[in-house]
Image (cartoon, rainbow, N blue to C red):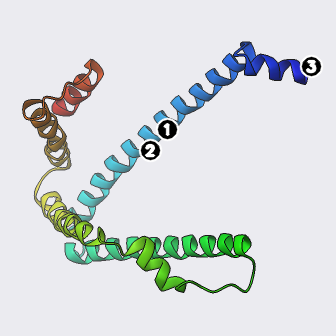
Amino acid sequence: SRTNNYLRASEGGPACDRRKMSMMSSLCSMKFASLLCLLLQNASLVMLMRYSRSRHDRPMFLASTAVATDEMSKFVLSSAMIVLAYLTASRAKDEEEGEGKGENGGFFGFLREHVITRYSLFMAVPALLYTVQKNLLYVALTNLDACVYQVTYNAKLLTTAVFSYLILGRTFSYSQQAGLGLLMVG
């Protein structure tokens, strides 16, 4: 029976179709779950930031301090991920070459090879601009209503799409046009 199922699956029979449909269904549900999580995260981020900037019962915190704390937490998390990647790669290399082999530069060699590349400087410019953008985001939420902020913030997607159409000649599907229309309406 297992052999027959395997043969049917390898020939593209009904067992293969069921497996493909199940996989497509789980991918589709994963897409919608991801979309829902992003929607909740973006909406709650704006609402919580606006709430924290509009409280009058205590002194307002500095936006630069919040941005610095945010960036520091990202730095700590990414550093932990780099150390984990190094440990995983060194364990795999040890198993492949056998114990007692040379380190080949150790952790700093790993950093030079995988993290601090010639493209790192190119990434510093967008990172700096992102930090400025986060500071301006706090200024905007301090002075604007959350709904007005969200609509104007989403307008960047609409203007990018318009310029992609005008300058690059990119075409958009009907569902993409409908999504852009929903963004425009708010």
Quadrant hosting residue 120? bottom left
Height in image: 7 above or below 115?
above
Task: Look at label 3 and name its amino acid.
Answer: Ser
Observer able to see residue 59: no
Task: Look at label 1 and name its amino acid.
Answer: Ala
Quadrant hosting residue 69? bottom left
Of residues 162 and 46, which is closer to you in this image? Answer: 162
C-alpha gap between disc 1 and disc 3 = 36 Å
Quadrant hosting residue 12? top right
Mark 2 secondary-structure assignment: helix
The residue sitting at 56% across, 75% down in the picture is 86
Disc 3 crowd, CA 10 A, few/some/many (<14, 14-19, 20+): few
Disc 1 crowd, CA 10 A, few/some/many (<14, 14-19, 20+): few
Q: Earlier in the sequence, mark 3 or mark 2?
A: 3
In the rendered structure, find residue 1 and report the number of the disc placed on it: 3
Task: Look at label 2 and name its amino acid.
Answer: Cys
Of residues 105 and 165, which is closer to you in this image? Answer: 105
Residue 181 as seen in the image, left or right of residue 98: left
- Name the spot of residue 62 as percent of width and height, x first: 20, 76
In the rendered structure, find residue 156 and report the number of the disc placed on it: none
C-alpha gap between disc 3 and disc 2 = 42 Å
- Name the spot of residue 10 as percent of width and height, x first: 74, 21
Label 2 close to label 1 by CB (< 8 Å) = yes
Q: Residue furthest right?
A: 1
Residue 120 as seen in the image, left or right of residue 150: right
Q: Earlier in the sequence, mark 1 or mark 3?
A: 3
Mark 3 secondary-structure assignment: loop
In the rendered structure, find residue 37 and report the number of the disc placed on it: 2
Name the residue that disc number 1 marks: 33
